[in-house]
Amino acid sequence: MRIGILNGPNLNLLGTREPDLYGRTTLAEIEHRLEELGRELGVEVRCAQHNGEGELIDVLHRWRGAVDGVVVNAGAYTHTSLALRDALSAIATPFVEVHLTNVYAREPERRHSMLASAALGSICGLGADGYEYAVRGLVTRLRQSAPSV
Ligand code: DQA
C-alpha cells in the first residue's frame, strides 16, 4: 500500500511559523515520523509540499493510480480551492484532511473547507500528531475495503 502526504502553502515554514499556533515541529520532522510510521505499518509513504495551487494539483495528478490514499493539509487553499477538491475527486483516491489547528475555533473564513465534503474524514486541532492519526485511520479503512493491499 502507498500513502501520499501532501502539504500546501506555508507549511514548509513549520517549526518557525507562528509557533504558538502551529507548534515547533518542522515539516521535515513530521515527514520523517510518517516515513517511520509507514515502515511500522508496512506501507510506503511519499511526501510532497508546494506553495502553489497548480503544483499541488500536478502532484495529485502524478499520484493518480500510484498511491492508494492521500493525507492532505492544503493550508489556506483548504478554504478557497475548488480546483484542489476537483483534483482530489478526479484521482478517485480516498483522502483524509488534516489541520494542525482547530480551524473551527479560528476566524470565520477558516471555518469552511472546500475539501471536507469529498474527504473520507478530517482531523484538526491535534497539532503535528494529527498527521499520524490520519495515516493510521486511512490505512485501517483502506485495509478494511481491500484486505490484500
Ligand atoms: C492550517 C489551517 C489553515 O487555515 C491555514 O491557512 C494553514 C494551516 C492548519 O494546519 O491548521 O496554513 O491548514
Image: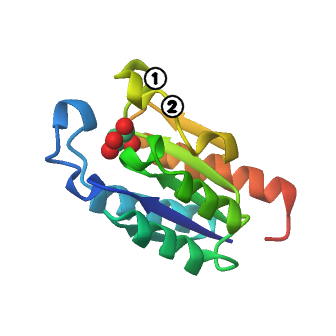
Q: State the image coordinates of residue 115 (x, y, percent, origin top left).
A: 58, 45
User: Which of the image's four quarters has the N terminus?
Assistant: bottom right
Q: Are marks 2 and 1 in contact (CB under 8 Å)?
A: no
Q: Residues within 10 Å of mark 2 (few under 14, many from 20)?
A: few
Q: Residues within 10 Å of mark 1 (few under 14, many from 20)?
A: some
- Three-letter amino acid code at disc 2? His
Q: Nearer the viewer, residue 8 or 126?
A: 8
The nearer-to-camera label among 2 and 1 is 2
Q: State the image coordinates of residue 147 (x, y, percent, origin top left).
A: 85, 63
Q: Earlier in the sequence, mark 2 or mark 1?
A: 1
Q: Which mark is residue 104?
A: 1
What residue is rendered at 17% in x and 37% in y? 19
Q: Nearer the viewer, residue 2 or 80?
A: 80
Q: Determine if the C-beta at disc 1 is less than 8 A from ligand 1.
A: no
What residue is rendered at 53% in x and 58% in y? 84
Determine which quarter of the picture holds residue 20: top left
Q: Nearer the viewer, residue 139 or 78?
A: 78
